[in-house]
Amino acid sequence: MERDTHDLSVLFAPRSVAVIGATNRVGSVGQAVFANVFKNGYAGVAYPVNPKAASVMSVKAYPSVLDIPDPVDLSIIIVPSDAVPGVMEECGRKGIKAAIVITAGFKELGGAGVAKEQEVLAAAHKNDIHLLGPNCLGIINTDPQVSLNGSFARLMPRPGNIALVSQSGAVGVAALEYAQGEEIGLSKFVSVGNKADLNENDFLAYLKDDPQTDVILFYLEDLTDPKKFFQLAREITGEAGNKKPILAIKSGRTAAGARAASSHTGALAGSDQAYDALFAQCGVLRVESLEELFDYALAFSTQPIPQGNRVAIVTNAGGLGIMTTDAAVRYGLEIAEFEESTVAKLRASLPPAANLHNPVDVLGDAREDRYRAALEGVLGDANVDGVIVISTPQLMTNLAAIAATVAEVAPKYHKPTLVCQMALGEIEETLAIWSKAHLPHYHFPEEAVRSMAAMGRYATSIHRDRYDVKTFTDVDRERVQAVLNRVKAAGRKYVLEPEAHEIFRAYGFPVGPYTWTHSPDEAVQAAEAMGYPVALKIVSPDVIHKFDVGGVKLNLAGGDEVLKAYGEILAAVDQAHPGADVQGMLVQKMMPAGRETILGMSRDPHFGPLLMFGLGGTFVEVFRDVTFQLAPISEDWALKMIQGLKGYRTLTGYRGLPPADLSAIGECLERLSQMALDFAELKELDMNPFTVFEEGQGAVVLDARIFIG
């Protein structure tokens, strides 16, 4: 049943809260949770529930939630795990519609804990209760109209416009502490715990329309429903009227699930590549640390989104300007080229020794008047999308006055302005100025550069094309299914190469002339029919890596060479794989030289088909110049896969080489996306090499490998 996420208002803004398991015992979770609810200005009514206490923190306690005389919207449960199912039933009889189970000891322990969690979930579903947890830290809403701290965190965050959803309670606590230390406000905090009922998608849907939230942060260890996350995130970051940046830390950069890894794609693909692809395709910015998470969030929550990635740098220290420039280039920003009119304005306002071009060096003795002139010049330049302002303390420098000037000038131009003041002592006044003006301050220029670069990447993503997926109608599904049925009937997981070519041809991939032969004479006849030169390849379910065992002969120019090669291949295969089931030889027309690439697919058990494109050949696993995207892909994302290669320039024309046929690659990636979705039994496949010819001359599949499951 589809969940109405707007019902989560009872979780975030309840009129009354019952803390079941509240206690006076010092140092207990029950005491910490009730104290947080009671002492942080909660606008509703709080009821402690404890059958052994007359009161908790001088508030009348009730033996059971059923004994509370008034209606209760939300229960926070901190009782032994064995008692939780019964308490949940009582909450249902009371008419409570949301419950936070902080208690641990459920599926995170495995075994009996899994069954116990199912009992709790069954009770929640039976009574139509939204369940957060179990095994979670709780929830916080800093909205002054609510001011609910339903957690056992040590502190109550200051109000802000950043929401944080964490799968780990410990990481959540660390994030709250970091935000407090950096004076960053939050709108909402959620610890999702075991996600027995409510998960990250429910909170993403709620935060999408939350008026207090402008930026959404996640700490994730997995996704419950990646497709739902994709749909919600894509709408929020790029298709909703009120776009909200989403930033995520995803821990665990290891391959998930057992993989045969018999194909190149299977060897190179893993769950981390799938997460990277998912986040990129739906506009989520992936970050690596809590520091980066909040650095970026600070910029997004206070500054306008830039129109592009062209940055200007204003500094009173030439060395720092150079370092910042290097960092900007390293992180993908473009150093803006100023208009002539801007340079003229700077020349008229700055001393002769000042650098008038990017980075602008206003010199070490600069006061606020030079900063004003430099900022007004570069912010008014149409070639500048954002500015990083650096100031270092000198004897003649009034840092507070400079801060006030930046705070006055920057908002007039509606371009992101990030500041870095390289001072540690006596900076309270300047920090207060930055905070009041909503200007993000960074300790080091590299931090500001990373944040500006993230804003530039987000700007690119929100101006993306609609995600229109093409459907090819010139495909023969019945023919593919017939081949797959034949493979299954033979009890095989490996699709023989001629069968793979038949599948690819049925889906419109460019496959060169080939014939499956079963004797030396048949091989010669086939070669003469298609014309020399030809290639000869072993066909055997026991020989997957044909080149490695001498199972391939190339550039055979006549019948005698074919006969000789036939015998040599059989002898080599027999030596490498004695008793191998040889089912003939594939005779294949040799094709003209081109650029060798690889197209592949690996079916992730959680995400579905993960498509791969890269520079191909026998060294694909050595150089690993590959990109991944999740199916389905649009034409725009097929092009992004191609452009994402480190060796992309080798395909666009390099040192006299003409451009390769990129449109042929893109179309085949889209066809692969459709085929992978049409046939769930396709587990792994490679087309390697997938040889691409000059622009307008197409491409051809030269070698094929498919595994079904």
Image: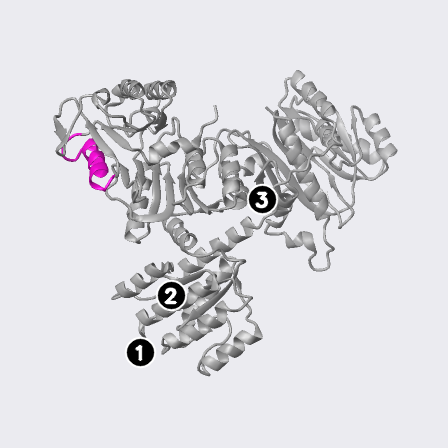
Q: Quadrant of residue 703?
A: top right
Q: Mark 3 points at which residue?
A: 627
The C terminus lies in quadrant: top right
Q: Mark 1 points at which residue?
A: 396
The circle on residue 570 is none
Residue 236 appearing in the image: yes
Relative vertical location of residue 128 with respect to residue 279 in this rendering, above or below: above
Relative vertical location of residue 561 with respect to residue 449 in this rendering, above or below: above
Along the polypeptide, which appears first: circle 3 or circle 2? 2
C-alpha distance separating marks 1 and 2: 20 Å
Judging depth in this view, the residue of 156 and 352 nearest the camera is 156
Q: Quadrant of residue 582?
A: top right
The kind of residue on which mark 2 rests is Ala
Q: What x and y, as percent, mark residue 599?
A: 65, 39
- In the image, the segment drawn in magenta is 23-42
Mark in front: 1 vs 3: 1
Q: Residue furthest front?
A: 70
Q: How many numbered circles does the render carry?
A: 3
Q: What element carries label 3?
A: strand
Q: Mark 2 points at which residue?
A: 407
Judging depth in this view, the residue of 375 and 219 nearest the camera is 375
Q: Is residue 40 magenta?
A: yes
Judging depth in this view, the residue of 609 and 102 nearest the camera is 102
Colour scheme of the picture: one colour
C-alpha distance separating marks 3 and 2: 42 Å
Q: What element carries label 2?
A: helix
Relative vertical location of residue 633 with respect to residue 130 in this rendering, above or below: below
Left/right placement of residue 309 relative to residue 180 reads right
The kind of residue on which mark 1 rests is Met
Q: In which quarter of the image is residue 195?
A: top left
The kind of residue on which mark 3 rests is Thr
